[in-house]
Amino acid sequence: MSNKKKKKWWQKLIGEKMTNSGWLSFFIFGLGQLKNKQKGKALILFAFQFAYVFIEVITSKLVKGVIPNQPEYWGYGFFRKGIHGFITLGETTGGRFRDNSPVMMIEGIMVFVLILIYIVIWKMNIKDANDTNLSIQRTGIVQSSKAFFAERFETGFAYIVSTPALLLLLFVSIVPILFAFLIAFTNYDAYHNPPSDLIDWVGFANFFKVIKLAGWRTTFAGVASWTVIWAILSTMTTFFGGLLLAVVINSKRVVLKKMWRTIMILPWAIPGMISLLVFRNFFNQTYGPLNAMLGMDIPWLNDPIMVKVTLVIINFWLGVPYFMMLMTGILTSFDKTLYEAATVDGANSRQTFWSITFPILSAQVFPLLIMSFAGNFNNFGIVFFLTGGGPRNLAYEYAGHSDILITWIYNMTKDFKMYNMASVMSIIIFLIIGGISTWNFLRSDAFKEDN
Amino acid sequence: MKKVVILLLVLSMVLSMSGCKKEQVTAKFADDLKWDETKQEYVFEKKAELKFWADNDEYAAKIIELWDAKYPDVTLSYENVGSVDTAEKLKLDGPAGLGADVFYIPHNSIVDMRESGLLFQLPESDEAYIKEIMQDSATAVTMFEDNMYAVPSSVENIALVYNKQILAALPTLPSVLTVTGANLLEQIENEEIYLEELYEGVANWGNNFAGTGVEIPFLSDRFEDVDTTAEDIHTIFAYQLYDAYHNYPFLTRNGYRVFGEDNNDPTQFNITSKEVTESIKSVIGDWYGNVDGSKLFPGLATIQDIAWDQGPARLQKGQLAITISGPWVMGDIKTNLTTWAETGKFGVTADTKVSDLYGATKLPRFNNDVQPTTFSGVQVTGMNVYTDYPNATMNLMRFLASDEVMKEVYSTLGKIPSIKNSDNVPGLNEDEIARGFLSQAAFSHAMPVIQEGNYMWDPLRDVWTNIFDAKMSVEDAQTRSLDDYNKILQNSGAEQ
Amino acid sequence: MNKIPKKNKKKLSPIDRVKDIFAYFSTYLLLLILTVAILYPVMWILGSAFNEGTSLASASAIPKNPTLNNFVKLFKETDYEKWYLNTLTIAIANMVVSVLIVGTMGYVFARLKFAGKRVGLLVILILQMFPSFMGMIAIYVLFLNFGLLNQPLALVIIYSAGQIPYNTWLIKGYLKNVPISLDEAAQIDGATKLQTYTKVILPVMFPILTFVAVTQFMAPWFDYILPSFLITSTEKKTLAVGLYELINGQANTNFTMFAAGSVLVAVPVAILYLFLQKYLIEGLSAGANKG
């Protein structure tokens, strides 16, 4: 406490100094608040801690009873069992009651997340007890819980209203991702079949294995470069196509705007799966109606190069409506006078568009383009339903000419159950795609402006 | 930030730990079962409720109706779950207590589900009973280390399926055998042509109607526009070329069997054997002269174009004369027949039977007088280990193997029941098309039920792709397939 | 931003007139080409729904004997109406929940300053790019633990949560075009943040929220993977799952029925879009900006 201005790390966490109230709250949530005469706050905090303890007790053998001969850890409460299960990934096999390793791992991850939340609340609870106590010591005024919450709602508005969304994301998005990530450090493969078999942590063994396999390097390099090209092409074509359509239909010359827009939206309104199934026959070289109509013999889906072109074309058809709709919506937020100037002035409209509308627009949608890029990077459906990865590429393992990384991973898990290897590949892919995206994001105006 | 660091530390600690002591806790299921001698059934648990998974609503409704008539006190419900999706779904639903008590699965799912410990192992008494009423080849696939894990329901295999109207109009093809038949239909049904000769003859016609020089009956009914050549191609003989299930028979001329004589010896993949070389060379034969075009049928479709749906689709529309497919193609044809009868298409009237228009028979022999061997698939019922009512569920398993259900398997699903005594299923013995498939069934063996069975498909298929698409010599193609297979073995962690 | 001086439109030289006609011509030509490119495959998809038989492989755009059989069978032999209703419920719930969450999040992230904002959303967004099929198992176990398995609510949660980062960025970008002076004016008048949001920003966001609403409404109609894992009972089956069962498995090859069922999905979406277009296009933001 030598330098008063610079707070030490623990002061940031728990307030200026530990008070009696702080110590009370350290052990029992809300007790310090009670001492500070803030009953409402105390009750809420206590209820939070109570909920955790209650869950732990009610899920333990104290309440649930035991199965004959059950291992001791089966009687642990939800939280303790979760952590134990995560570390061991199960110890009993055979029979009807047994450990299910993946489930234990997921429950463990959930427990970790819940404990993280617990710690955050704990910290806030202690800090609040200290701060309030010190404030009372200084001023002698006790702020009512009601007044406190009213004030907090305004100052902490951003945090409070985004908490539900963040909690949702934490569980629905982050927990599954953590699980998929951690599989890479296990021996979850065709020879370890839960729930009958247990799976184990194997550290980095799978990563070493991937490095050792020469065949995978060739496949990875080939598939990855096509995936990147695919993601860029498909994002760019749909974006510019959609923009063009939006601008053209918005133009003063076009009458019946609603009709045009509704026609253009149709490919998006029709469920993608049926479109892709129809397209598969539509582009069939031998039997397809397209070649019959054109009177040509174009190997739409059978030639290594052509199949890629076809994929981009079909993706264009499927994806343009979305971007048209998006651009139409965004263009309306533009200053009307600007926009009118751009469209009315026939001779200058193109220049105006490129010099004014487009830069603003692109800065604005840049983050969306990156996300769209990532979406196309992992666009499973179009490749799976249309080509199934074909035509075959002799140099690849489990992949064909049109396979992208995500379908390649799928092949590994579906037929050969190489869950662990697929997870390793996922991590590598993620490092690439995440890296590119983060780099782009950090450079983007959309991000920089947010200081 | 600190929290992240701490979390990472904890994680890395955890990850570095491995290999904990494992102990076994076994709760035997068989102990739960109580047999009632007088009723010849298991003693139903009180308040038992059962659920089964199948993928056909109509069939399920019939089953529930029959069950309710027999066991009115026990509720049986149904959920539509695709039989190939069952394994993955039960891995989650089973332990969660949401799985069905009984489910239909293709027999090659047994490996995966058994390894995952999801299948109830049948008591010996039931095993004996099932073996008594079901065909030996069907029960064989349900066995592992002398225990039975599932009950067969129906069997299916591919065979030669053809349009009688068209074949009857076509002339006979040259054969070294004595040909007494007046047309191609009789020639095939009388087995007066070798497989190689059929291929060659069809290829010489260019494999389309135009090349036969014969007027095809009801040609304008078959095609929207008869003049469009694009519609009128590849219509005499087509089947799914890019698929091991359909191509396997053509490897078997000289005695090759995948995974050895019992099809389940993982050391006997043997794709590079000289039997395979000879078989392939004989099948692709002299008429195969168009390596550059990479076509199995010269000048016609590329391999990938004849996907799984093209053959059956064209056959049921009357646009294809011969295909190689399974009994499932008949379902569509039956539906179409009613529509055709209304419009008079193909001269169909209300009295026309499916067997008047279409036929099925075993594949033609190879020219060394050996019958091609096909894979067969057995549809089986499995019992969920996690069931709450093992006795009631066992009764349901037995019920689903009974004659009254077998009748529905045949009449509603159009599948061929796997029971020994086909007399118990009315109409089955008189069914010409079913008999056609059965004639090939005698030359079928079940798909392997070992883990390696999942790895064989791509290498088996790609022997052909390597020849037709990658223009490899037959021997190179075989070596390549073996390499691919070994790689899968290695990558999947088999060496551990 | 620079304002472009308006030219007087009345005085058009002959050259301008030719240019104008040419512009008209090329605009409509482009539209016509695109319409054909879009409608031709649509016609095939529609046509396949009216084909006899069950296969798509030999279906044609204009069937020789068009039949309504596929539609009739869909309503007679399946629970199509029930699936439709189930999905509609989920779609509407998802639409409402998403708009509520995302609208607020968009406002918070676009207008308010707070620690961790920049990094927070970016991290989640990037993490969501993790490619995986295994995550499904985790979601299953998660909902099992929270007792949400076999509840349509589970689907609403997933669909709305999954799109939060994307849509938040979307709205954040949109709000960039709305002058901050609007907020400041409100705050000077003594409005709280909540009031500023509901009274000032929300009306301005209308077009983009409409867009979010339409896209979120779409999600449940197409997805069959999640519901087939999370919803087990026949009663609660969604449309995509029901339709997929028609074509899943060797014996189930009702592709034309599948097409018929899918085509019927496009109807409410197209109508919704037609109806909401005016909010999407002639949004209130233009008016707000003029002030």
Image (cartoon, helix red, strand yellow):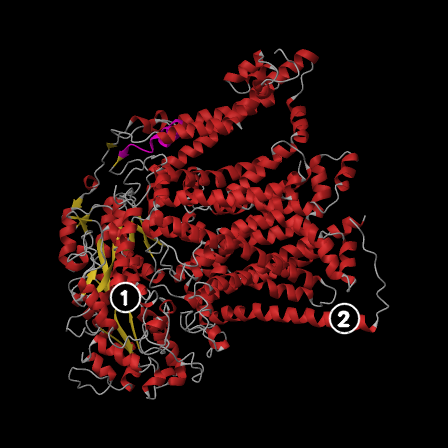
Amino acid type shown at disc 2 = Lys
Residue A104 visible in this rendered orientation of the protein: yes
Chain of the residue that carries numbered disc 1 in the rendered image = B
Label 2 resides on the chain identified as C
Q: Is residue A397 left or right of residue A327?
A: left
Residue C69 on image: x %, y %: 44, 71
In the displayed structure image, the side of residue B325 where residue B192 appears, left or right: left
- Checking the image for residue C19, the label placed there is 2
| Magenta span main SS | helix
Which residue sits at x=50%, y=60%?
A: A272
Secondary structure of the residue carrying tag 2 is helix
- Of the 4 image quadrants, the one containing the C terminus of chain A is top right
**Number of residues whose C-alpha sits closer than 10 Å to that of mark 2, classed few (under 14), some (14–19) or many (20 or more):** some
Q: Amino acid at mark 1?
A: Ser
Residue occupying the point 19% across, 82% down: B175
B476 is higher (above) or lower (below) than A133: below
**The magenta segment:** A80-92
Q: Nearer the viewer, residue B446 or A348?
A: A348
What residue is shown with label 1?
A: B473
The label shown at residue A148 is: none
- Residue at (62% x, 42% y) in the render: A443
Q: Could you tell me residue C37's position as x and y percent? A: 57, 69
Mark 1 secondary-structure assignment: loop
Q: Is residue B236 left or right of residue C91?
A: left
The quarter of the rendered structure image containing the N terminus of chain A is top right
Quarter where residue A79 is shown: top left
